[in-house]
Image (cartoon, helix red, strand yellow):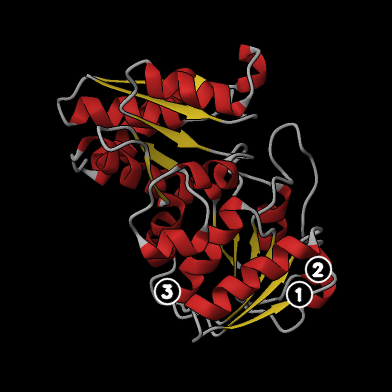
Amino acid sequence: MFRLGLIGDNIKRSKSPMLHRLAGRLCGLDVTYEPLIPADMGLDFDAVFDQCRESGFRGINITYPYKERVFPTLNVPDPRVRAIAACNTVIFDGAGPSGTNTDYTGFVAAFRESLPAMTPGTVAMAGAGGVGKAVAFALAELKATALHIFDTDAVRAEALANALRTNAPGMTVSVCPTIEDATEGADGIVNCTPLGMTGIPGTAVPSALMPKAGWAFDAVYTPVDTQFLMDAQKRGLATISGYELFFHQGIDAFHAFTGARVDTKELRHALRADALEQA
């Protein structure tokens, strides 16, 4: 049996438990997957993490706001993930907890599947936290020409920019003092903040700042139809929803946990069927 879980603060509506259980069923594996909210458990993140490590979990996913916090505690073999300095997937084995980042690989897959004929171009990104780091490095792999980063924490934004300049020199990187500055001349607009998530209303990029052509991606997927994405669609932008990142990072995490490859078409169908049943 593969005992898995997810640690995060705002995950009551997460579809990750169902994705991994369905993937296990399709692969003929016995998979359990538990949502773990530290505040609801009366524990801090470190205590929940230790509890997972000591009670037989094979692995856990980590989501907002703990992806950077968990990183220093892990063995991270992939140099790309060490450069990102944030992990969303942890595996427990005899060598101790090891970490990877399937947000990084998942965004690359989501972009290539959703916009196969498009290149990122110049990208404005709001948010330089855990998911922002992964998406930024994924944009470099996708051959984005330039990345304009805005974050309310300028120190965090500059740290990400410096990491990109060192590890992804083919992409021009700048830190912008406002979202208005970041979006000027952009071909793509990316939201990697929690704004728009259930319980955190709003949008990181006002509609008037969006280009009239190009593309947009929102890392938020609960709900899927965020204000950010609806505004982008009204402006005529091609869009990638946070659901696509959720789906592809989940596939990669499932493989990391179990070694199995799930059929992506079958998994999409199973998730749609489950959603219709729940509705």
Residue 185: x percent and y percent? 72, 84
| Location of mark 1 (residue) | 182
| Location of mark 2 (residue) | 179
Q: Tell me the CA gap for discs 1 and 3.
A: 20 Å
Residue 175: x percent and y percent? 74, 75
Dot 2 or dot 3: first in sequence order is: 3
Q: Residues within 10 Å of mark 1 (few under 14, many from 20)?
A: many
> Does residue 76 sit above or below 48 in this rendering?
below
- Are the residues flagged by discs 2 and 1 in contact, CB closer than 8 Å? yes
Q: Count the marks.
A: 3
Q: Amino acid at mark 2?
A: Ile
> Does residue 270 sit above or below 123 in this rendering?
above
Residue 152: x percent and y percent? 81, 58
**Residue beneath the point at 71% across and 75% down:** 211
Q: Amino acid at mark 1?
A: Ala
Who is closer to the viewer here, 169 or 236? Answer: 169
Q: Tell me the CA gap for discs 2 and 1.
A: 5 Å
Apparent side of residue 20 relative to residue 203 in the rendered image (left or right): left
Who is closer to the viewer here, 10 or 95? Answer: 95
Dot 1 or dot 3: first in sequence order is: 3
What is the secondary structure assignment of the residue under circle 2? helix
Q: Tell me the CA gap for discs 2 and 3.
A: 24 Å
Q: Amino acid at mark 3?
A: Glu
- Are the residues flagged by discs 2 and 3 in contact, CB closer than 8 Å? no
Residue 183: x percent and y percent? 75, 75
